[in-house]
Amino acid sequence: MSHWTLGEEFETPDGVMRWGSLGSGDPVVLVHGTPYSSLLWRDIAPALARTRKVYFFDHLGFGQSEQREGQDLGLAAHARRFAGLLDHWGLTRPGVVAHDIGGAVALRTLLLEERSFRNLTLFDAVSGGEWERGLFRLFLEHEDVFRQLPGYAHEALVAAHLRHATATGFRPGVLEAFLAPWRGEAGQAAFYRQYTQVRQADTAVYEHLLGGIEIPVRLVWGREDRILPPRYAEWLHERVPHAELHWIEGAGHLLQEDAPSQLLGFLTAGFPSA
């Protein structure tokens, strides 16, 4: 996984974000979620770059971007930084593809930061409703306890959480690569710092605007998603009535890992109303 290097920097008041791009043509931006990084796009980005200009980045506090105490890692801050990146790149109407909390970041950027997208693909994405639950709820309620876990216990927890997201398992070396930013004392602090700043209140504020989205929207969901089960896709589809909804059988939360070819098929297919 060492070949996945983000060679560009974007300065923010809270630290440096790292980003990269491939290809040429109509722009598309790939937005990852938590606790992952742009490494999720290692297969998808080069394939899309055969016909598109593809942009990808690590959210502040994730992957190769800067991690430090005091960073604002809430969804509102992530959306402001994403809007700033779009401005930095000079993109006025890119296609956007977003996964996990990247979905909420993209929706806030569209609806509250008032940036324009050409189209939007959301898959296995946080969008709204009641998503503060399970292990995430425990992180919110017991941050001090989790921060004090012995390193081996923290690593085991993060590894189990990552495995829970895939229905087919990781290829050799991939789990280790996703674990790397969260290892050690600094990584452990960074892991719980970002999770405890991501709140449902930051999606509730735009839920009433979902029905007014006019751009083409495609929803793609793994039937075996245990992080955001299919009811979350149905919730979002009810609120963006013109959106296409597609299922991928046998896949979990990480379509990039479980069904990359099928996901790529959707990402390269045109939008009927685009």
Image (cartoon, grey):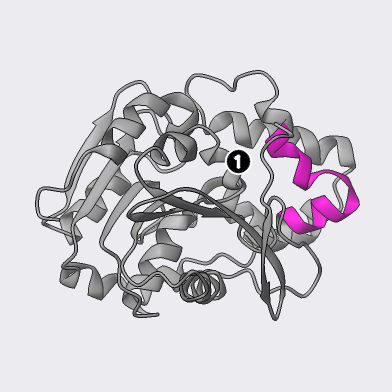
User: Picture coordinates of residue 194 (x, y %)?
Assistant: 66, 61
Residue type, mark 1 in image: Leu
Write down the region rendered in magenta: 177-191
Instruction: Check disc 1 and report the residue beneath it.
Output: 39
Locate residue 27 relative to residue 62 in the image: left or right.
left
Determine the image quadrant of residue 196: bottom right
Give the answer, above or below, for where 5 lies relative to 163.
below
Give the answer, above or below, for where 15 lies relative to 94.
below
Q: Main secondary structure of the magenta part?
A: helix
User: Magenta span has 137?
Assistant: no
User: Picture coordinates of residue 105 (x, y %)?
Assistant: 45, 64
Q: Residue furthest front?
A: 24
Secondary structure of the residue carrying numbered label 1? helix
Locate residue 146 relative to residue 37 in the image: left or right.
right
Q: In the image, what residue occupies the spot 37% across and 77% down?
A: 205
**Residue nearest the viewer, comparing 251 with 86:** 86
> Number of marks in the image?
1
User: Picture coordinates of residue 70 (x, y %)?
Assistant: 77, 75
User: Magenta span has 182?
Assistant: yes
Locate residue 12 relative to residue 188 in the image: left or right.
left
**Residue nearest the viewer, comparing 94 with 213:** 94
**Residue nearest the viewer, comparing 188 with 178:** 178
